[in-house]
Amino acid sequence: MEIRNYSTDVAIIGGGGAALRAAIEASGKGQNVILVDKGRPGRSGATPCALWSVQAPFGPRGEDERDSPEQFFEDMVTAGRFIGDQNIVEVVAYTACDRMLDLEKYGVHFKKYDDGRFVQTPMPGQTYPRSCFMIENGQHMSTVLAKEVSKHDNIKVFKDFFVFNLLKNADRVVGLIGVDMLTGDTVVVNAKVTVVAAGGYASLWGFSDNPPTLIGDGAAMAYRVGAELVDLEFNQYYGTDVIWPPSVKGTIFLYELMIADFVDGEITDKDGNPIIDKPLPIRDDAIKTIFNVIKEGRGTEHGGVYYDTTVSPKTEEEISQLFKDMTPKHYRFLKDAAGIDAANQRLEVAPASHYQCGGIYINERGESSVNGLYACGEVAGNFQGANRLAGSALCDTQTMGAQVGGCAADDAAKGDLMPVEQSAIDQQIDFLQSFISDKQAETRPVFIKEKILETMDAHVAPFRDENGLQQGLEAIKSLKAEVPKISVADVKRYNFELKEALETSFALDTAEITIGSCLFRTESRGHHNRTDFPNTDDQNWRCHTIVKQNGGTPEYAKRDVIYTRLKPED
Ligand SMILES: Cc1cc2nc3c(=O)[nH]c(=O)nc-3n(C[C@H](O)[C@H](O)[C@H](O)COP(=O)(O)OP(=O)(O)OC[C@H]3O[C@@H](n4cnc5c(N)ncnc54)[C@H](O)[C@@H]3O)c2cc1C
C-alpha cells in the first residue's frame, strides 16, 4: 500500500463553514494549514443546505436598536435550557457582528436598507429580530468562504479525502490518516494541532434534511482517541420537513415563516385545526406538540401534520412572492419535483432529524479533552445546550470557527511537531485492510447503514424510553458484529464501497454512544424526551452528559455546566 506523508502546523478536517473559517484564521496568523474534506470544500456538508438566517445582534446597525450581545447571549442560554457552557456562548454572542462583517468583506451579500443597516428577520426565541438575511443562503456563504480560502497560499486543500482516523503519539493527537479518493493513496498528515470540523450527524436517522454523508465521522473519530463527548442525547428535530410525496421527502420548509410578519398560516392536524399557538414556540416545544398530535392519531395520512398557507389572511400572490424572496430553492423544488405550490396547497410535514446540539466537549478556545485536538462547528458540543435557536448554527461556524482556528494557530506557533510513530500507522493500515479482501462479502456496508437508520428512527426518536433504547442498543451491537463480514473490492481510485465501509464503522460507534447518552439522562429536557421520565429534573440533571471510551467501552458521567453571566436562578 502506498503511503504519502505530509506535515503541517494545523490540520483541519472538513470543508463546511466552520472548517473554512478556521483555516482562514489560522492562515492569517502565518501558520501552514492542510484542510481535508471527504467532499468538495464549499459544496459539502450542511452549510450549503442552510437558509438565509444567521444571527448577529447588530442593534442600531440592524433592525432594532435595543438588541445587544447581552440579549443574544441570554436568548441562547435560555433556549438551550441552561445546559450550554456560557464561556463558549459568550464567544458566539459577543463576536457575531464582527464575524458577519468578515463575511461581508469576503463577498457574502446580505440584505440591507438604503442607509446601510442590516435587514434582520424575527425568529422564535429572539427577543428582537436578529437573523441577518444572506442572499442566496448557505450555498452562497459556502462558495464565498471556499473562494477566500483559495486566496491563501499557506492553505493546502485536499478534496475527496476521507479521514478514517486520528493519529496519536502517547497522549497527544499528532495528525490524521485518510484515503485520497482521487489517487487511492493512503495519506498521513502529521500536524502540530488538529481541528475536527466534520459537522454533525443528523443523517444517522432515516428521516433527515441533512446530506446522507453526515452520519457520525467526526464524533466517532474523536471518541476513538479518547476525547470526551457531551450531551449526545440532544439531537434537534426540525418540525416541518416535507414527508409526502416521496420525491420531495426530507425537504425542509420553514416553520419560522408561519409567523404573522411572514406567511401567517397555520400548522394543523388532519382536520384543519391549528395545533401551534402564536407567537410560535421555539423548536423543542413545537416538535413536542407535532409529535403528540401524530401519536394521538390526529395526523395526516402519511404520518405528518399540515403546513397550511391557504388559511392565511394574505393573498396567494403575496405568499408566493414571500417564498420566492425567502426560500426560493425549496419553493421551486417542491413545484418542479412534486408539482406542489406551497402558496396555495397544504404540505404534509413532520419532524425530521436536523442538528446535533451535543458533540465533542471543548473549552472556549476549542480545545478538546485530548492534547493537540480541537473542534468547532456542529461537531463541537457544549454550548447550544438542549435546544438551539434558528440562525445560531451558521453564526457558530463563523464565531467559533474563527476563534478555534486562531487559538489552534497560536498553539501551533508555540509547539514542536511531534512525529507520528510507525506503529500507529501500521495499526491504522491493518484497520483499513480489514475491509478489503477478495473473499465473498457476506454483507455490504449500505445494508448495515440502512439498518442503523431504521434503528435510530424506531428507538431514538425525540420521545424515547428505556425499553426502546435498550432494544436500539442491542440492535446496534449486533450490527457491529456484522462489520467483519464486509469485504470490499481492492479498487484503487474512488473506492466508494471502502468509503461506505469506513463511514458505517464511524456511524456504529456514534449510534452506540448516542443511545447510551439517551439512556443515561433520566429526565426530559429540550430535544430529549423520556416518556418514562417525563419531567425536567433540575436538581439532578441540569448538567452535561459526558461519554468517553474506557478500555473499549463507553463510560458515562455527569459534569457541571459553566455559568459565567446568567445563573438559572437569576
Ligand atoms: C436544511 C438545513 C437548513 C439549515 N438552515 C440553517 C439556517 O438557516 N441557519 C443556521 O444557522 N443553521 C442552519 N442549518 C444548520 C447549519 O447549516 C449547520 O449546523 C452548519 O452549516 C454546520 O457547519 P459545519 O461547518 O460545522 O459542518 P458542515 O457544513 O456539515 O461540514 C462538515 C464537513 O466535514 C466533512 N467531513 C465529514 N466527515 C469527514 C471525513 N471523515 N473526512 C473528511 N471530511 C469529512 C464534510 O464533507 C463537510 O465538508 C441548516 C441545516 C440544514 C441541514
Image (cartoon, rainbow, N blue to C red):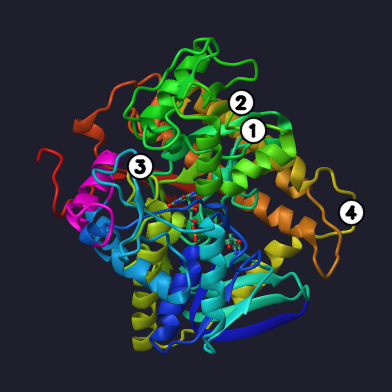
Residue at image mark 2:
345
Foreground disc of the pair 4, 3: 3
Which numbered tag is attached to residue 256?
A: none
Q: Secondary structure at mark 3?
A: loop
Which numbered tag is attached to residue 341?
A: 1
Name the kind of residue labelled 1 in the image: Asp
Residue 121 in the image: x percent, y percent?
A: 36, 47
Q: Is residue 61 above or below residue 128?
A: below
Foreground disc of the pair 4, 1: 1
User: Going 66% across and 64% down the picture, which residue do you hit?
Assistant: 39
Q: Secondary structure at mark 4?
A: loop
Residue at image mark 3:
123
Q: Residues within 10 Å of mark 1 (few under 14, many from 20)?
A: some
For this view, does 484 lie left or right of residue 157?
Answer: right
Q: Is residue 490 above or below residue 74?
A: below
Q: Secondary structure at mark 1?
A: loop
For this view, does 232 lie left or right of residue 130?
Answer: right
